[in-house]
Amino acid sequence: TGHVTLDPGYVNTGACTSAITYIDGDAGILRYRGYPIAELAEKSNFLEVSYLLIYGELPTQAQYDEFAEKIRRHTLLDEDLKRFFDGFPRDAHPMPVLSSAVSALSTFYQDNLDPADAESVEISTVRLLAKLPTIAAYAYKKTVGQPFLYPDNSLGYIENFLRMTFGLPAEPYEVDPAVAEALDLLFILHADHEQNCSTSTVRLVGSSQANLFASISSGIHALSGPRHGGANSAVLSMLEQIVAEGGDVANFVERVKSREKGVRLMGFGHRVYKNYDPRAAIVKKTADDVLDRLGKSDQLLDIAKQLEEVALNDDYFVQRKLYPNVDFYTGLIYRAMGFPTQMFTVLFALGRLPGWIAQWREMIVDPANKIGRPRQVYTGERERSFVGMEQR
Ligand code: CMC
């Protein structure tokens, strides 16, 4: 069968060329379309960054307005899709609800599924960006038994999502600008990260010419695992566990180092960054700012900082170049905003959506694109003859 080079986990195997995101893991550099992440975090907003990732350039004012307006016009879910949420148990985790609803979107827009049709790709892009916040908010509302709110298109993208999540029909809801601003920033930081597990999943599924909804739904599943996007909620569970066990940070680090089964320092380490994750540096500062502005203090933030301090000065972590990643401090911010732990990875998905879409679209028009089909090295039995059941 020819020579096969094994590379479990694709540590050193490139599968595509891409002009979207640049990472230098040793130097701790991240750029979208050439723009440093810190500049975008400071000066841009999530919709503008989405446009940049998907179309390759920063929009003019007119382009931005048109893009935002198109998204505003598609925020509603079909009433039939709304009923879909009734089929899940009350305590359904919002991540599988999110991926299921995105998968179901393809059944509502069956005329626009052809990956080769540019207009269909365009309208699917808009529908996804517009509807994912609505779906995410309903997935949350379901768990607390509150009525679903229709989108309010007089609000901005982030404000609309916050109102649908935390608002009630009987009461006016004032979006706290500190919360909206911080969430917008966190979405920017999550918007793309080249060929990570979920993005590679989106590309692999899409390489079979499966439609955009199917590909993104698969990406959401890939994101849900604790080694990937699920890490942000796992960090919080870890911090809570440390507090419950008396707050002994050094002892927890010892357990990590002794490789106790299943004990990792969640929110630490990265396949590509062998230096401080540039996103984590921004998130850490934001955590301080947001908690300050909301007038909240959180014992868990103190624990997180102690953990970082201990780990960064410990040989185990230094030798392996393990630094805090983007997920280490995000959960603390989401918590201060009022999101339950279950929603953290859903928030990651909302942020990552434009990156997935941009990567899928780049792949679809890439002349070098073929169906993804890795090889293997077979280690099973040689040929043998079938034995009847009575003789086994
Ligand atoms: N705590 C303790 N030890 C660790 C950790 C950790 N968080 N991460 C890696 N190591 C050790 C690992 O045991 C191995 O040691 P040794 O060489 O002695 O066996 C070495 O460091 C290399 O680790 P690896 O598992 O081979 O590295 P990887 O590139 O396959 O894994 C990772 C990367 C992110 C999955 C891993 O660092 C990890 O599980 N981190 C915790 C989960 C996490 O925070 N994930 C979020 C990643 S960033 C955002 C995202 O993608 O969603």
Image (cartoon, helix red, strand yellow):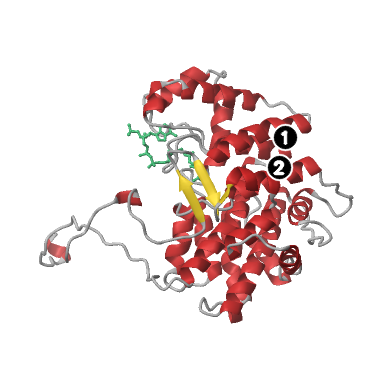
Residue under label 1 = 290
Q: Is residue 45 left or right of residue 156?
A: left
Compared across the picture, whether 370 is left or right of 288 comes to left
Please identify the quadrant where the N terminus is shown: bottom left
Q: Nearer the viewer, residue 19 or 16?
A: 19
Q: Earlier in the sequence, mark 1 or mark 2?
A: 2
User: What quarter of the picture does the C terminus occupy?
Assistant: bottom left
177 relative position to 56: left or right: right
The image shows residue 5, relative to residue 26, as above or below, that is below
> Residue 186: x percent and y percent?
64, 45
Q: Residue at x 71, y 42 (%)?
A: 182
Disc 2 Cβ-to-ligand 1 distance below 8 Å: no
Q: Residue at x 76, y 65 (%)?
A: 65
- Judge whether 89 appears above or below 302 on screen: below
Report if the CB atoms under discs 1 and 2 are less than 8 Å apart: yes
Q: Answer few, some or many: residues within 10 Å of disc 1's Cα (few below 14, many 20 plus, some between 14 and 19).
A: many
Mark 1 is on which residue type? Val
| Category of crowding for the residue at label 2, using alpha-carbon neighbours closer than 10 angstroms: few (below 14), some (14–19), many (at least 20) | many
Which residue is label 2 attached to?
Answer: 182
Q: Quadrant of residue 237?
A: top right
Q: Position of residue 327 (x, y in %)?
A: 55, 39
